[in-house]
Image (tube, rainbow, N blue to C red):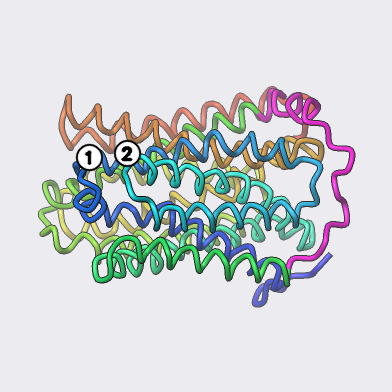
């Protein structure tokens, strides 16, 4: 086991962070290039937007399938294979001559996402002392948050200047670098799952505490994307900002993601179950306050930063909670499926926010979003009060 001080995490953990950065960029950068992609391939912007949905579907489907398929592989080998899939998928995106082939390439790239973060979370916890597991997960997910702050704006700029295909080539290069760093820095497995049994893993996945943990993740993160999906019209039509101000304002959201992610990991190291409830309660409070905050520009800036903080403060606690409920056998599968649960929550939240927007109006979006973390807290309470088969902390 490799130790980790508060100031210097092990190089292997930073290698996982590099991989998370590349995956984060490829997931979100398409949002800033929808017009360019649509114009080049002859489809509408709304059709181009389905490339985001296609990626999410790839994550949800790929996470359990690839995790089961690679269950008997050494975890380092799994990570390297996933980064290879990631590189191939992004290179295929850059070369895609049609919308249909670009969609297929996006799905291929997405297949690596859930299993990488799921298996990577397990590997990360093996690199540190037991009391630092949640912080290790948070450090790996820092790659995802930095992708939002730096990678996505840079990728968008590159795509606008040199064409959207150049962005996917650049992401593929990032994947090659991450693959090389993981190969060099991540140690070989000491507990290779040679006797892994996918049937046993599925039984673990069906345990009541694991299922309740997954449901908590879905509900909790649905609340985030019910608001964030529509943050642009909320800032323009409710808070009164010009459209040009949206990108700089979203830097506040990105900064909140980084700080919330690290804070959530640190808190979960000290007390996992309290961290789960505290982070979800914090998210609920922020979403309730978003409605009045978005009525003024100053309030909106505070709300956007707070939403970023609250959103990712939940990630490490929820991820470690599901993993601890699986307790060894099936841990990698439960971890990967929980990543899919985050993405399922994204899709549900975006749909619910859209329904609230179309039927009631922008003012109802944040109130609708607040219902989801409230439901997540209720599910978590059921899990804690009626534990079964696995410890909850």
Frontmost residue, 343 versus 180? 180
Count of marks, rendered view: 2
- What secondary structure is marked by label 1? helix
Q: Is residue 319 magenta?
A: no
Percent across and percent down for residue 38 are 22, 48
Which numbered marker is on residue 257? none
The quadrant of the image that shows the C terminus is top right
- What secondary structure is marked by label 2? helix
Task: Say which residue appears at 31% left-offset and 52% top-offset.
Answer: 31
State how far apart marks 2 and 1 are (Cα): 7 Å
Eyeballing the image, is 153 above or below 293?
below
Percent across and percent down for residue 354 are 25, 32
Neighbour tally class for label 2: few under 14, some 14-19, many 20 plus, Cα within 10 Å? few
Q: Is residue 194 magenta?
A: yes
Displayed quadrant of residue 213:
top right
Percent across and percent down for residue 15 are 64, 68
For residue 146, side relative to residue 45 (left or right): right
Eyeballing the image, is 81 above or below 200?
below
In the picture of the structure, the residue carrying the numbered disc 2 is 50
Q: Which residues are magenta?
A: 186-210
Displayed quadrant of residue 154:
bottom left
Percent across and percent down for residue 141 are 55, 58
Frontmost residue, 141 versus 302? 141
Task: Say which residue appears at 63% left-offset and 69% top-offset.
Answer: 14
Image marks 2 and 1: residues in contact by CB distance under 8 Å: yes
Residue lying at the far bottom of the rendered structure: 7
Residue lying at the far front of the rendered structure: 97
For residue 35, side relative to residue 192 (left or right): left
In the picture of the structure, the residue carrying the numbered disc 1 is 46
The quadrant of the image that shows the N terminus is bottom right
């Amino acid at each position: 086991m490799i130790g980790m001080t508060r100031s210097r995490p092990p190089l292997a953990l930073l290698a996982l962070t590099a991989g998370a950065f590349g995956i984060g960029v490829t997931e979100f950068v398409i949002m800033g290039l929808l017009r360019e992609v649509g114009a080049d391939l002859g489809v509408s912007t709304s059709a181009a937007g389905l490339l985001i949905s296609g990626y999410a579907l790839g994550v949800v489907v790929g996470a359990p399938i690839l995790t089961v398929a690679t269950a008997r592989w050494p975890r380092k080998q799994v990570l390297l294979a996933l980064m290879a899939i990631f590189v191939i998928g992004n290179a295929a995106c850059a070369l895609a001559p049609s919308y249909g082939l670009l969609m297929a390439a996006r799905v291929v790239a997405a297949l690596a996402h859930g299993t990488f973060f799921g298996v990577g979370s397990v590997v990360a916890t093996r690199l540190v002392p037991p009391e630092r597991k949640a912080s290790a997960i948070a450090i790996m997910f820092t790659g995802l948050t930095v992708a939002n702050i730096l990678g996505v704006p840079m990728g968008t700029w590159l795509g606008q200047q040199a064409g959207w295909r150049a962005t996917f080539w650049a992401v593929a290069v990032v994947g090659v670098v991450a693959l090389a760093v993981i190969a060099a820095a991540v140690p070989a497995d000491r507990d290779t799952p040679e006797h892994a049994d996918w049937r046993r893993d599925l039984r673990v996945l069906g345990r009541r505490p694991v299922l309740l943990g997954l449901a908590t993740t879905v509900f909790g993160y649905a609340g985030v994307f019910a608001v964030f999906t529509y943050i642009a019209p909320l800032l323009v039509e409710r808070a009164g900002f010009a459209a040009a101000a949206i990108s700089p304002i979203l830097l506040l959201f990105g900064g909140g993601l980084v700080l919330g992610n690290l804070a959530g990991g640190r808190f979960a190291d000290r007390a996992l179950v309290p961290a789960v409830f505290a982070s979800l309660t914090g998210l609920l409070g922020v979403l309730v306050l978003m409605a009045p905050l978005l009525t003024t520009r100053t309030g909106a800036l505070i709300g956007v930063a707070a939403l970023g903080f609250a959103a990712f403060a939940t990630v490490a606690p929820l991820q470690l909670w599901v993993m601890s409920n699986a307790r060894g056998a099936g841990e990698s599968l439960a971890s990967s499926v929980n990543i899919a649960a985050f993405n399922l929550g994204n899709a549900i939240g975006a749909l619910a926010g859209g329904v609230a927007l179309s039927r009631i109006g922008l003012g109802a979006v944040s109130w609708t979003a607040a219902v989801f973390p409230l439901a997540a807290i209720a599910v978590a309470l059921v899990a804690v009060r009626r534990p079964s088969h696995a410890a909850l902390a």
